[in-house]
Image: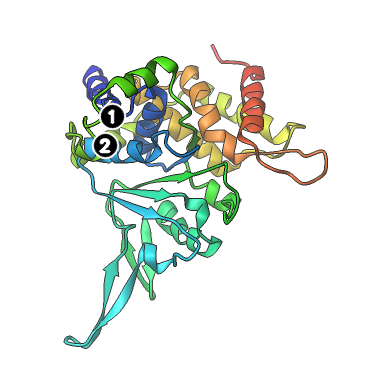
Amino acid sequence: MNQTKEVIERLQKNIESVIIGKPEAIQLAIVTLLAKGHLLIEDVPGVGKTSLAYALAHSLNLSVKRIQFTNDILPTDITGVSIFNQKENRFEFRPGPLFANIVLADEINRSTPRTQSALLEAMNERQVSVDNATYPLEEPFMVIATQNPIESHGAYPLPESQMDRFMMYISMGYPSPEDEKRLLGSNSQGTKAREIKPVLGKADVLHLQERVANVSVEPVLVDYIMSIISASRHSKYLSLGISPRGGLIFQQAARSCALVRGRDYCIPDDIKQMAIPVLCHRVIPESRHGSPKRSHADTAAIVNDIVENVEIPV
């Protein structure tokens, strides 16, 4: 396990050479990838969301494609389209940008629900269906989506079914004054995210993903996870608690967190650390006016209160 921890630390340090002052966001992105999940990053422009996706992909020597979502983009612009080949007198499938190891869905809430839904099958089943034919996506496969919470004009909020497909929901935030000073004082022509050198390969990622599946979760910790899930469903502050699928994803994230920390078994701290990024976007707070509206700050506070009030197994 020490070797695994060293490998992951080398990956994190490589990404940190580009993304300055955001070790937690980088670690959560790595945890999501190794858990075979998808990541949603919501924050204002210019804090490194896109750079994080490119740095992760290039550090692992994985293919990466970027989709800039707009309100006129069509589902076939993402999945691909069948084009008639006159010479061979048959239709040929031309893969879309979803056919990559890491797909950067930039400003995903700028597209219409119809286009957003084109991602559902790919994210859940890791395949794409076009014209009654199904095409598997190459592993590893991860969607990193971004959205800007400030501008609401022309935006289409992601529905619950779409939000639930993302393993984690995080915010990058502004760097600390010290880190921003380092950023301003660094060479503006320094290493860019697309120029970063790989430290691992595709085979290494697949191997680490297999290791995550073998991380043990003791029955007492399964009960701990169940207690958190049950508390969310009975909380007077929530109109929607954690679903069974959310519980499975929560446990998988805790397994991945344990591996990233160099262990082949989970401890309560792994579960506590994963609670907010994994659970906040899966619950809906109660509204005094009967119209539930998700606010990350509100749900984070509620989830944190739930976790703090559930007894930790010893």
Q: Badge 1 local density, few (<14 within 10 Å), some, or many (20+)?
A: many
Look at 36% across and 29% down and name the residue there: 26
Look at 42% across and 52% down and name the residue there: 123
Q: Secondary structure at mark 2?
A: helix
- Place residue 234 in its image quadrant: top right
Figure check: 137 above or below 141: below
Q: Is residue 285 left or right of residue 81?
A: right
Observer able to see residue 264? no
Query: Looking at this rendering, what residue extends furthest in the top direction?
Result: 314
Relative image position of residue 75 (x, y in whole percent): 43, 66
Q: Amino acid at mark 2?
A: Ala
Q: Which quadrant does the N terminus fall into?
A: top left
Observer able to see residue 185? yes
Q: Which quadrant does the C terminus fall into?
A: top right
Figure check: 204 above or below 108: above
Pointer 2 and pointer 1: residues touching (CB < 8 Å)?
A: yes
Relative image position of residue 89 (x, y in whole percent): 22, 88
Q: Is residue 138 left or right of residue 22?
A: left
Look at 67% across and 31% down and name the residue there: 298
Give the residue at mark 2.
193
The CA span between labels 2 and 1 is 6 Å
Label placed on residue 196: none
Relative image position of residue 309 (x, y in whole percent): 67, 18
Label located before the other in sequence (2 or 1): 1
Give the residue at mark 1.
18
Relative image position of residue 87 (x, y in whole percent): 16, 87
